[in-house]
Image (spheres, rainbow, N blue to C red):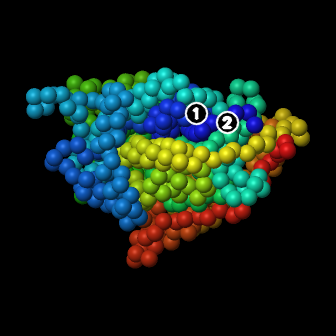
Amino acid sequence: MDETFDVLIIGSGAAGLALALQLPADLRIAVLSKGELTAGSSMWAQGGIAAVLEDTDSVEDHVEDTLVAGAGLTDASVARFVAEQAADCIHWLLHERVPFSTEHRDGKDQLHLTREGGHSHRRIVHAADATGRAIETTLEEQARARANITLLEHHNAVDLITARRLGHGEDRCLGAFVLDNQTGHVHTYAAARTVLATGGASRVYLYTSNPDGATGDGIAMAWRAGCRVANMEFNQFHPTCLYHPHAKSFLISEAVRGEGGILRLPDGERFMPRFDERAELAPRDIVARAIDHEMKRLGADCVYLDISHKPEAFIREHFPNIHARCLEFGIDMTREPIPVVPAAHYTCGGVVVDKAGHTDVPGLYAVGETSFTGLHGANRLASNSLLECLVYARAAAADIAATLRDNPPAIPALPAWDERHVTDSDEQVVVSHNWHELRQFMWDYVGIVRTNKRLERARRRADMLHREIHEYYRNFRITADLIELRNLALVAELIIRSAQARTESRGLHFSLDYPAAGNGSEAHPTILGPSAPPPYRNLLK
């Protein structure tokens, strides 16, 4: 056993860092990051955080907007739980000195609130068009200053350690096996409490707005540890990612449409009013499907998002980063429309948790995009994701602090990872080939529009890849790429199984075989329970 912590947090995005910073200073905390501390998806979040901060708005309206977007699958009690705590979370971030955008109003400087699709009011707190970056860098600075927080960058969690899988009686999470990417050594980290804050799984698709690390690690590890997952069929495709061969799916924020951006066909025609009376401000699933429909109907490579009718100074002030990034590719959004396409953006399903972030395995928590809280239902409302991270990080931190104070568990000696019977791979091409094949068939068969036949094809390919990857994992020394591929293949299987189980179209899941929403009997989460947790590959007793 290499080291023991009170709390081991796997993931260093907004959820993981917010949780670490709200734990008591006398707890010994470790935060794992696969790359640099700020390498996760939180850095890429542009829009903002939804919160009721004005008298003209109400928690009831925020809840109702969330329920409408969730298409009948949002847990109303969870929506209220989150909406009621939103203002306190904003005040905490302000206390941590996050530089949100302000405006001079009613004789004083106040937070600038914008509006996004699906919201009935201006309630989005933001930091220009780089809210995630502002939050992540601020929390990173605070975490680096805390003596009780150990930051383990360039470390990939391999698997959770549970008493059940070790044969130690009553089940609970005991920590994790962790690969140091710089040395290639696998460490055994024990912890009284372990938290999954690893983000979503949008890299399972060929085109995504997410960074390379969004490989569903927490979801896969939790499943192998014996946790349930839910609603994995609901993958949100952001309607507007920059279409350019070298842009790597740069996101064009929802706020561009919130501030008057218009979606146009290549000939300049506005098309969204034909699909929804809310036009460009309809929920993301509706906008993404409309764009996908028009692109396929016309054989077009992209559509266009046009905000050039707004004053140049307004665009530069509100969207400085988007403006600068577009200019790098020769697109001046103050004068011309931006070419855009949909791309996988957010995983609405995940590890089943309660309002304190507990999973099915005692001692194990999940927060942020890794988790399924019931908030997002069949479709996430814009800017509810960072909010969910903050609310559940706060709730989990309070629960961990209370339970460790009242009943700190004894941690048994844990085995080391044994590499004596494996070799270095001489066929790394297997990993890269399977990585590409997986993401290609998920895009082709399990994308914005699905059919039974496509899902069957995807299931067969996923099963084949899963067997190949498992064999490779058993025989060769593990690498970060292999860990991610193994996790992504499992997540792909869970997405496909969930999609096959839903015999209707609802929210983000649209099937040509079941084009209508069900009569109400199907309006429940798709929950998958795991089989018996598999044994660890190799341990030193």
User: Is residue 335 visible from the viewing direction of this image?
Assistant: no
Q: CA distance from mark 1 to mark 2?
A: 9 Å
**Residue in the picture at 32% in, 45% down:** 86
At which x and y percent is residue 38?
51, 29
Residue that sits furthest to the left in the current view: 107
Residue sitting nearer the eye, 475 or 411: 411
Q: Secondary structure at mark 1?
A: loop
User: Is residue 53 visible from the viewing direction of this image?
Assistant: yes
Mark number displayed over residue 4: 2
At which x and y percent is residue 167?
77, 56
- Residue type at numbered disc 1: Arg
1 and 2 marks in contact (CB < 8 Å) = yes
Would you place residue 154 above or below residue 55 in this image? above
- Residue type at numbered disc 2: Thr
Image quarter where the C terminus lies is top right
Judged left or right of residue 72, residue 532 is right
Q: Residues within 10 Å of mark 2 (few under 14, many from 20)?
A: some
**Residue in the picture at 82% in, 45% down:** 538
Residue sitting nearer the eye, 80 or 423: 80
Would you place residue 129 above or below residue 158 in this image? above
Q: Residues within 10 Å of mark 1 (few under 14, many from 20)?
A: some
At which x and y percent is residue 398?
45, 45
Mark number displayed over residue 80: none
Point out the tag, 1 or 2, that comes first from the N-terminus: 2
* Tally of numbered tags: 2
Residue sitting nearer the eye, 235 or 231: 231
Would you place residue 432 above or below residue 228 in this image? above
Q: Secondary structure at mark 2?
A: strand
Would you place residue 315 above or below residue 194 in this image? above
Residue underneath mark 1: 28
**Residue in the picture at 49% in, 31% down:** 25
